Image (spheres, rainbow, N blue to C red):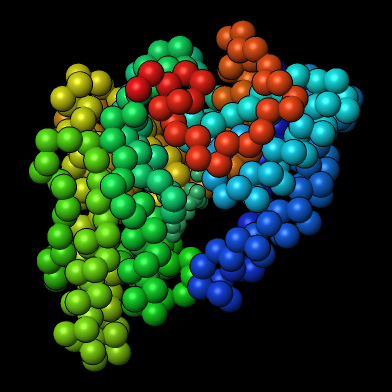
Amino acid sequence: MNGTVRSNVVASQVRLHSEYGGVVPELATREHLRNILPVIRSALDQAGVMLSQVSVVAATQGPGLPAALLAGYTTAQAVAYSLNLPLLAIHHHEAHLYSPWIAGNPPRAAFERFEPNISLIVSGGHTLLVHVTDGLRHRVLGSTLDDAAGECFDKVAKLLALPFPGGPVLDEIAESGNAAAFEFPRSLLHEPHDNFSFSGLKTSVRYFLEKRPKLLGDATSLRDVCASVRAAIVDVLVGKTVRAARRMGVMCITASGGVSANRALRRQLAAECSRHRLRLHLADPAFCTDNAAMVGILAGQKWLAGEPPTPWDAETRPGWPLEQGANGEG
Ligand code: KG4
Ligand code: ZN
C-alpha cells in the first residue's frame, strides 16, 4: 500500500441521463447494479491484481443517493466478508478533501507535500468550505444554504436550453463570452460567514430571460449570459475561499468536485492565490469528478494510520454529514 493509483475505472451515466435532462434515480440504480461487477473486474485487470492479493476493501458509505450507495457498499461488504478482509467505510466528501493530493504519472498520493489547507468541495450536490489540518483532521467552515454550485450551473443551463450535463457545456460556451456584459447577484459574498447561497442567482437568471424572450436566439448574447453567470458563481466561490484562508492564516487552498473542473474557477483561484501568496492544489481534472482513486488513497492513508476496520454489517449512511466523518471536528 504505497499510495499509487494502479487503476481508476469510471462508469459514466451521463449519456443515459442526458435524454431526461437530469439524473433519474431509478435508472441510476439499475445502471449501478449492472456496472458494479464489470467495473471491479476491469479495475483489477488494469491494475494487474488478483482479488486474492487484496489486503483491505474500501467503499463509500455516504452521503449520497441511497440506492446508488447500496449498490457499491453492499458489494464491497460482500467481497470483504467472503474473503475475510477488513472493510473501511469512507465518507464521500472526506475522500474529495484528499483528491487534490493525487498527482504524477502514474498518479499517486503526494502526502509528503501535504500541508494544512482550506478546501473547497464543489459538486452537483454540495458546496463545502473545509479547514483540513494535519493527521487527516478537518472542520467544516460553511456550506450552501440552498442549491449547490453545480446544481446552479445545471439549472441555469436548463433555463438557457443547453444540453445535459449543463455545467461543462455552459463553461465551454462562456469561454467566448463577455463576463461583464450582464450583472448577476453574488449572494452572501460579503457576509461575514462561510456559507453559500445559489438559488437567488438561478431565479434572477429566470426573471432576466423572461424579460428578454428573444435573447436565446442570439448566439452572442447567449455566450455573454453564460460568461456573466459563470463569473457570478466563480466570484463567490473564489472570494469566500480566499477570504477564509487569509482570515485563518492558512497558506494553502485546494479544490475538488465536478465544478472544480470549471476553467474560470481554476484560472481565478490561481490568480487570487498568486496575488495573496497562497499555494494552490487543484484536483487533476481526472479526479475532480467522483472517482474510486480518491476513496482508495484516503483508505490507504487511514489504514496506515491505524484506523480500525468498519464492522462488516454497518449500513450505508445517505445523510452522513462531513462534521461527523471519522476525523471531523466540527
Ligand atoms: O462531483 P460531480 O461529478 O458529481 C456530484 O455532483 O457528486 O459533480 C457534477 C457537477 C454537475 O453539476 C456538473 O454540471 C458540474 O459538476 N460540472 C461543472 C463542470 N464540470 C462538471 N460545472 C461547471 N463547469 C464545469 N466545467
Ligand atoms: Zn462527489
Place of residue 265 in the rendered image (x, y in percent of width and height, measured from the top left): 30, 49
Q: Which quadrant of the figure contains the C terminus?
A: top left
Along the horizontal axis of the image, is 245 left or right of 28? left
Q: Residue at x 50, y 40 (%)?
A: 319
Q: Quadrant of ligand 1?
A: bottom left
Q: Residue at x 44, y 53 (%)?
A: 124
Place of residue 166 in the rendered image (x, y in percent of width and height, measured from the top left): 43, 67
- With respect to residue 123, does 295 lie above or below? above
In this orientation, which residue lies closer to the viewer: 41 or 154?
Answer: 154
- What is the count of numbered marks? 0
Asked whether residue 166 appears in the rendered view, the answer is yes
- With respect to residue 300, does 50 lie above or below? below
Place of residue 31 in the rendered image (x, y in percent of width and height, measured from the top left): 72, 59
Q: Which quadrant of the figure contains the N terminus?
A: top right
Along the horizontal axis of the image, is 44 left or right of 10? right
Q: Residue at x 16, y 85 (%)?
A: 211
Along the horizontal axis of the image, is 167 left or right of 233? right
Q: Quadrant of residue 56?
A: top right
Asked whether residue 262 appears in the rendered view, the answer is no
Place of residue 218 in the rendered image (x, y in percent of width and height, measured from the top left): 27, 87
- With respect to residue 22, does 222 lie above or below? below
Q: Residue at x 21, y 30 (%)?
A: 244
Along the horizontal axis of the image, is 317 left or right of 312? left
Outermost residue toward the top?
Answer: 306
In this orientation, which residue lies closer to the viewer: 6 or 131?
Answer: 131
Q: Quadrant of residue 278?
A: top left
